[in-house]
Amino acid sequence: MIKILGGYQTDFARNWGKEGVSIVEAFKECVNGALESSHLNASDIQTIHVGNAAAELFLSQGHLGALAIEADSSLRGLPSVRHEAACASGSVATLAASAELEAGRYQVALVIGIEQMKTVDPLKCGEFLGTAAWYDREAKGIDFPFPKLFGQLGSEYIARFSLNNEHYAECQSYLSDLMFNNARLNGKAQTRDWDIENMSDKLTAKISPEISVRDCSQITDGAVALIIASDRFATEHAKTRGINSDSIPAILGWGHTTAPIALSDKLSESKNSRYVLPHARKAITDAYDRAGIDGHSSLDSYEFHDCFTTTSYASLDLVGLTEPGKNHNAIENGSIERDGLLPLNPSGGLIGAGHPVGATGVRQLLDSYLQVSEKAGPYQVKLKNKNVLAVNMGGSGTTTVATVIGMNTA
């Protein structure tokens, strides 16, 4: 059993370049914050895993595993490695760190997700992010390729399930409004202070036929650190703090799948499936099975990779809230509101909280930990089951990592 001892997130509303903050300083801030949160010293860390998608493009900087040890001199000499899986880089880094702990190689791991994206203009940023698709086939020479790709996901739902175009667009607007509203309660969300009403002209601008600016996640500078440990270490650590080790949230279950990288291939392969994104559905059900839970009914909320409103719409059937094609029912009955049956992204998600691509998977896990620990503050949801699902996706639904965070009651 892998326990989460604590973590830290930088303020996603910041622009590091304008502040004169380097990526090394961002490493230091999130690592020191995570150590303080966990009541640990840097000398307690035994292995380091960094999730980052595209520092070579945004910063002309590679080898981030080595750069991470600059956060504290006590980290020098430790094994440290960087993982890349597009927008799922952070969760893949966490999986690798968990595997090392489960193998008994180490007892305590530091996981860092980090991305500095505001070094270029939005058009260039879109080009860089296009490398997470099949670049030559899907992104080369195309402005903002991912809004166009994820617009096709929406079109597939409309065509496959004979949905009304206007009703689907209303669902998209609802989903973005929900994320902006949730973000207002999150003191580290990128859009928490945005005046949405007075930004309507900008937010309604179309990027593709199906996607407007308000349907998109944000370009974000952000870093998140999480400290995870073996059950043995967590039990001893709990004793030194005078707390019950059962009060420390754990990674109860996980799922990890990879679909064909081209969206057209995904959609073609899924024609005979009940789900438009069957590989993502499998990652989620694998996480449920490994956690030993029945499904969405055993969750208190879920953090889903809403890089666009089309993916948050898809999430409703993928997690099991509705049957495929009936996703709109969960919107109409209020199931995903903060006080609903299964709140979606109480943090504000990628649309409201921000999306530093390599950090998002770690941020989702940190927010899941905060919810289960009842440390989420103003955006805390009511707990009945003490289980939260995090779903991180890379590319156009290509790499999916699903994780159930909860209390070990066994």
Image (spheres, grey):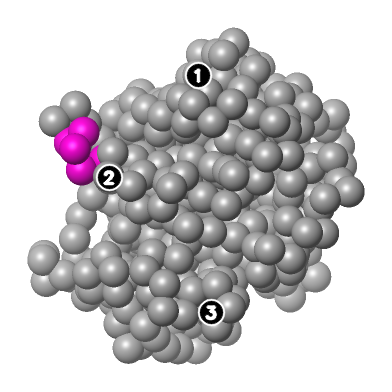
Mark yes or no: residue 152 visible: yes
Which residue is under mark 3? 135
Q: In the image, is 174 to the left or to the right of 181?
A: right
The segment highlighted magenta reads 199-203
Q: CA distance from mark 3 to mark 1?
A: 37 Å
Q: CA distance from mark 2 to mark 1?
A: 26 Å
Labels 2, 3: front one = 2
Which residue is rendered at x = 29% and y = 29% of the image?
A: 184
Labels 3 and 1: the sequence-earlier one: 3
Q: CA distance from mark 2 to mark 3?
A: 25 Å
* Label 3 secondary element: helix
Which residue is under mark 2? 205
Labels 3, 1: front one = 3
Kindly identify the amino acid type of the residue bearing the numbered disc 3.
Answer: Tyr
Observer-nearest of 10 and 228 = 10
In this figure, what is the number of numbered marks? 3
